[in-house]
Image (tube, rainbow, N blue to C red):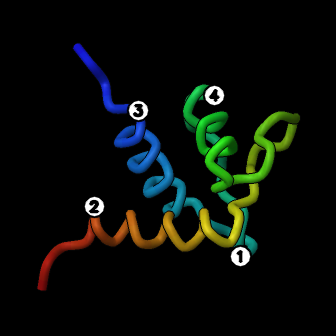
Amino acid sequence: MDIDEDKIDEAALALMYLTLHDHYRVWKQIDWEVTNRLHDKGLICDPVGKAKSVVLTDEGLKQSEELFNKLFSKDK
């Protein structure tokens, strides 16, 4: 099967929005390959380290919220 990694990254970023705390921090319970790609795309700060959370960049926060609403909000 040919997997679209961009779609995986979008879903992961959207799910990170569920764990948003302290304005920009999210829990990093996502696969390392995904977090590395999100970092390479400039959406999160460097995920390497002992911290259990990562910091979303301004663009990462914006996209995370937009994708969460797009993928998981019920239409009214």
Q: CA distance from mark 2 to mark 1?
A: 21 Å
Q: CA distance from mark 3 to mark 1?
A: 27 Å
Q: Mark 4 or mark 3: which is in front?
A: 3
Q: What type is the residue that disc 4 sits on? A: Trp
Q: Marks 1 and 2: in contact by CB < 8 Å?
A: no
Q: CA distance from mark 4 to mark 3?
A: 13 Å
Q: What type is the residue that disc 3 sits on? A: Glu
Q: What type is the residue that disc 1 sits on? A: His
Farthest-out residue, front: 41
Label 1's element? loop
The numbered mark, 1 or 4, whose residue comes first in the sequence reads 1
| Residue that numbered label 3 is attached to | 5
Q: Nearer the viewer, residue 59 or 18?
A: 59
Bin the neighbour count of mark 2 within 10 Å (Cα to Cα): few under 14, some 14-19, many 20 and up: few
The quadrant of the picture occupied by the C terminus is bottom left
Give the residue at x 52% y 63%: 17
**Tag of residue 37:** none
The numbered mark, 2 or 4, whose residue comes first in the sequence reads 4
Q: Nearer the viewer, residue 59 or 30?
A: 59
| Residue that numbered label 4 is attached to | 32
Q: Quadrant of residue 5?
A: top left
| Residue that numbered label 2 is attached to | 71
Bin the neighbour count of mark 3 within 10 Å (Cα to Cα): few under 14, some 14-19, many 20 and up: few
| Residue that numbered label 1 is attached to | 23
